[in-house]
Image (cartoon, rainbow, N blue to C red):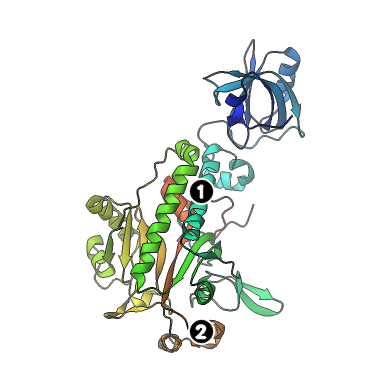
Amino acid sequence: MQRILSTQLPAHVGATVRLAGWVHRRRLLKSVAFLILRDAAGLAQVVVAAPAVREQIEALTEETVVEVVGTVVANPTAPAGAEVVEPTVRPLGPPAVPPPFDLYRPVLTATLPTQLDHAPTALRHPSRSAALRISAAAVSGFRATLDGQGFVEVHTPKVVASSTESGANVFALDWFGRPAYLAQSPQFYKQLMVGVFERVYEVGPVFRAEPHDTVRHLAQYTSLDVELGFVADHRDVMAVLRGTLAGMVATVADRAGGPLATLGVTVPEVPAEIPAVHFTDALKIAGAPADEPDLAPAHERALGEWALREHGSDFLFVTGYPMAKRPFYTHPDPARPAYSNGFDLLFRGVELVTGGQRLHRHADYLAALAARGEPVEPYAGYVDAFRHGMPPHGGFAIGLERFVARLTGAANVREVTAFPRDLHRLTP
């Protein structure tokens, strides 16, 4: 007999079926017992009346994996709208050791450190697994949207010979006796692949050895990277980003309705045109000093409140960041060379995306590195490619975990990450 999932029970009323999953909860009443079974789709209620089966149910521990065979009857009050009666129950493994928290309760009350210490079981709770399903739907929407616009998915090295961002915050490792680093981003490679496919994207891990211990930073996270050629300037990149976000949000709404309902989340509307302000104006709106070189988290929150109040938008572009705060490959604004053709996208008052137009002429790269006192040699393989003809191009990167955290209202990015890696955590 082929196994079915809990959500398929209403289609099998009157039939004998086989379910399999975890013992989510047992309710032992005087005349009847209820076994709540959890599988990948949801919950199924199993009604136990036979004394021998009841005795078996009483001996089971929560999270034990079992198989149930029984008859389906309609019951609108059951989790799936139907339930299983007259069951036989067969354990598919030894009795489980219950986790240090109750997975059957609506809210997982354990502290976040406890949840992370016991992630393999904590992630079984509907609130935790819901966030991961939303994450999966977001990535699906990201890929589908870009595939539909002629982008090609690429896969680039995560071990590199030099740091991507010209900074010291990299994880060093030994590569057969040579120094190497975990990649801070696929930036160099995705630019080079514009010379092959014109439009590329990548979904992959990136590594930042920044000693942050905040609710919004991870040392390893998933980056959704995009790069496209033949742009006029950064505004072409912003337009692609807007369409990509709209596709992600729409796919989440379409494919993750159940998880959204579990978390009580309503997806935001992505405006047809996301409001944008120049960095100098953003400082004024946020009440920051005019000589501030970057936006602090408090400034981002103020800007998010302003965008919602003035434009009814959860999203806001901040353009024209100072060149001094952008990587050397950033294209300056031709009209205001101290500022860049770069941007950040704020989502509900938190930086979600960094992007912009890149340099594309070999001579400009040499000049940019010289201006920053950087030697060319560590970047030779990258910079040399621009001698062989590269179009004007630009791109962006979305932090997946941060996107899901802002979407779901999670207070800590670790709540939406399966096995987070940060300043303190390397296990499980």
Instruction: Say which residue appears at 69% left-offset and 29% top-offset.
Output: 61
Q: In this view, does 214 lie above or below 73?
A: below
Mark 1 Cα shell of 10 Å, populated few (<14), some (14-19), many (≥20): many
Side of 62 relative to 377 (left or right):
right
Instruction: Say which residue appears at 39% left-offset and 45% top-offset.
Output: 267
Q: How many labels does the image show?
A: 2
**Image x and y of residue 419, in percent:** 59, 52
Three-letter code for the amino acid on which mark 1 is drawn: Ala
**Image x and y of residue 400, in percent:** 49, 56
Residue picked out by circle 2: 383
Comparing 387 with 167, the one in front is 387
Instruction: Say which residue appears at 47% left-offset and 66% top-offset.
Output: 226
Three-letter code for the amino acid on which mark 2 is drawn: Val
**Image x and y of residue 318, in percent:** 31, 64
Mark 2 Cα shell of 10 Å, populated few (<14), some (14-19), many (≥20): many
For residue 277, which quarter of the picture?
bottom left
Q: Which mark is residue 137?
A: 1
Label 2's element? helix
Q: In this view, does 86 lie above or below 323?
A: above
Side of 125 relative to 304 (left or right):
right
Q: Is residue 54 above or below residue 406?
A: above
Question: Which quarter of the figure is the N terminus placed in?
Answer: top right
Comparing 370 with 292, the one in front is 370
